[in-house]
Amino acid sequence: MKKYILQSIRLTLVLMVLLCILYPLTLAFAGKFSKGEGSGEKVTKNGKTVGYALIGQSFTNPEYFWGRPSAVGYNAAGSGGSNKGPSNPDYLQQVSDRVDTLLKYHPYLKKSQIPSDMVTASGSGLDPNISLEGAKIQIKRVAEYRKLDKKQVEKLVEENTEKPLLGLFGPSALNVLKLNLALDELKR
Amino acid sequence: MNTELLGIIASFAITLVIAVPLGKYLANVFAGEKTWTDFLKPFESIIYKLSGINPKEQMTWKQHLKAMLTINSVWLVYGFFVLMYQDKLPLNPDGNAGMSPDLSFNTIISFVVNCNLQHYSGESGLTYFTQQFVIMFLHFTSAATGIAAAVVFFKAFRDKTTTTLGNFWEFFVKSITRLLLPLSLIVGLILAFNGTPTSYEGKDQFISLQGDTVNVSRGPAAGMIAVKHLGTNGGGWFGVNSAHPLENPSYLTNMVEVISQMIIPIAMVLAFGYFIRKRKFAWTIFGVMTIGMFMLLIPTIMSELGGNPAIEKLGISQTIGAMEGKEVRFGPAASAYWSTVTTIISTGSVNSMHDSGMPLSGLWQLLGMMINSFYGGCGVGILNYFIYLIIAVFISGLMVGRTPEFLGHKVEAREVKIAAIITLLSPLLILAGTAIASFVFGSYGDADWAVKPANWLNNPSFHGFSEMLYEMTSSNANNGSGFEGLGDNNIFWNISTGIVLFLGRFLPIIGPIAIAGLLGAKKYIPASAGTLKTDTKTFALMTFAVILVLNALSYFPALALGPLAEYFTMIGLRE
């Protein structure tokens, strides 16, 4: 028994050097050569960091495209979903309120045109994406508030649509932050 | 064809393309036959030498269990204290606090037993030191423990009669050097170059496009996320696990992560066949497991793509599917696939919030964890399945009036008793645990704990009950996923699930190893006309029936109170 205890302790220490020091440092070194140099890819505007490419942020201004509802208000110090069950009455009321808000800002919409991602909270609370339908329903509003031609905004949405992987696997999506940055560029 | 479904098909196909040759490779590695990774031998010799281990020393099944339990105890003690005092240790750029004793108790057991139930959020609950020197360390070592245990079981059936079953330390070290570490490096690099952070920088702050001040948690996560999947651990760096955009940045990384959690469990099943030189037997096991998986997977995908009937009633278009708790970049189909994979295998990582899934998806997830051997966890999946095999051999033997035999060894009262106890253990822990929790919730709602029992549940009615049932099931299965609405960071859940985790891990390892050790030592009886063949379709069907009947009998009442009741209430809405 004593033999096993000593062997266990020694093996644990040896493996710690390998697995907790050498392994992560190797990856940290390799990560230096990735896009965000291992600290997350940043998005800049006029040389200033305005966000992380992968982290969604809150957009409430009608001049911008909006992202999905978030259970943590896009506070990326943490993360979280609503964890509301599908039959929870309070939750369904919340969804219904979100629908009303959307309809208020988009009076031209019919309820059946609202895609589910725009009225449900994401898993992480930091979802950077919306669906193509989610962007399309907002085009008219954004164009009106920005006094832009609708066609111009439509084109922007099209350009910013990320196609399925290799055109084959998974859904299409739009990165809301990148889309809004492109919008701001357009104005100037 | 729909690109979302195509993504799932491709994921499963790539899994098989990797897992099949990996199975053969693992059999060679553990049998000590020539493999192309033998260049690592000198490096392993250094590890043995520094640890005072002689890898040639043969162990009996009892010695194997002693070695395994000893090293696991060392980790338990070490981790318990380090987690409690992590605030006084280095690598804590965000200034996070130490854990409370009950949370530390729960967390360390959870990671030692390869479960990775998390009653904290990584962003605020751990430091970079504990993330790596406790959590990630255990990701490797708990997975290697399971694999080594499975190899001991393989060893018992390789030779006709044997009591020496190889060396535990050798199996354990090789699981890391020849399997987990190299694969983790590859997956870690893929993640690093697709957006997952690797540097040790702490939180960052920026002003968003709209003018809000935002903080972002970061940290060297890529290495941990790689091994959390390969080792079927599942405990993530960030609170929401692989739903977090830094933990799982794109559809590509999502495929990589879902593939990497499946390859070792499948490879272990096939390795068993190569190792004991009965490949057909392993393929029939694989067949049963795969059919089981699809029976859980297909209805899950259908219910998620179908959307939430209650939201449909509000008049919202759900052409995409149910999106609450899901990420747009994965979509409901890949989220459903992941939720099935992560529950049948004991990973428990999530890329969507299971609490917000459709009622029937919850049902299939629960059932996957209850059965816990449709592939199952790293190494332990095949051990769980072995128990079902013994029961199936025993029942078939009774039905045809022959002495039950398994791979040429008589299965007698002692072995069947052990198998029966292990079979009964799961329903006992899950159902008694849920019953006690429900009782405390109902009768002691005001108890002065970190979260009052009255405030445990995030959802009312049947779904609230499911939250408690899920937590106990996930603990017993060493799965680690959760209906995360449950307010679980308080003394009741920390201690109760801690105990369930512990028993649900070690007894289902000790039991099968004991049976295998006992059987392996018995006289070998060559197959004759009177032998019950275990590699036929008939016997596969028999095993499948045993699995279904045992689990249906054990869990149907509890499932009826939770997800089934919720489902039937909800389809009432459609009319």
Image (spheres, grey):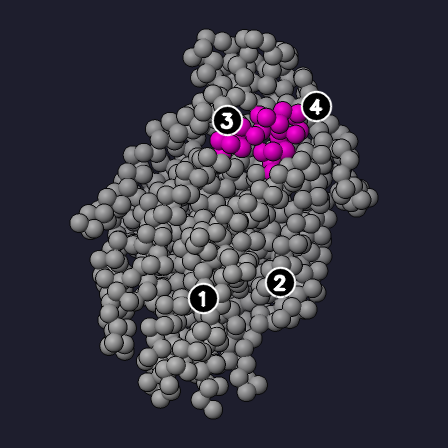
Please state the horizontal and vertical placement of residue B53, each as a whole percent of the image. Answer: 76, 37
The residue that disc 3 covers is B387
The magenta segment: B267-289
Spatial separation of the CA atoms under disc 3 and disc 4? 22 Å
B24 lies left or right of B542: right
Residue type at numbered disc 3: Ile
Residue in the foreground of this view, choosing between B468 and B490: B468
Asked whether residue B271 is drawn in magenta, I would say yes
User: Three-letter amino acid code at disc 2?
Assistant: Ala
Residue B59 inside the magenta-drawn segment: no
Label 4, label 2: how far apart the Cα atoms are: 43 Å
**Mark nearer the viewer, 1 or 2:** 1
The amino acid type found where label 4 is placed reads Thr
Decide if residue B5 is in sight here: yes
Rendering coords of residue B275 (x, y %): 66, 29
Which amino acid lies under the numbered mark 1 shown in the image of this protein?
A: Ala
Nearer-the-camera pick, B100 or B47: B47
Mark 4: few/some/many CA within 10 Å (<14, 14-19, 20+) = some
Estimate the spatial distance between the alpha carbons at disc 1 and disc 2, rounded to whole Å: 22 Å
Q: Mark 4 lies on which chain?
A: B
| Secondary element at tag 3 | helix
Q: In which quarter of the image is residue B69?
A: top right
Q: In front: B509, or B340?
A: B340
- Badge 3 or badge 4: first in the primary sequence: 4
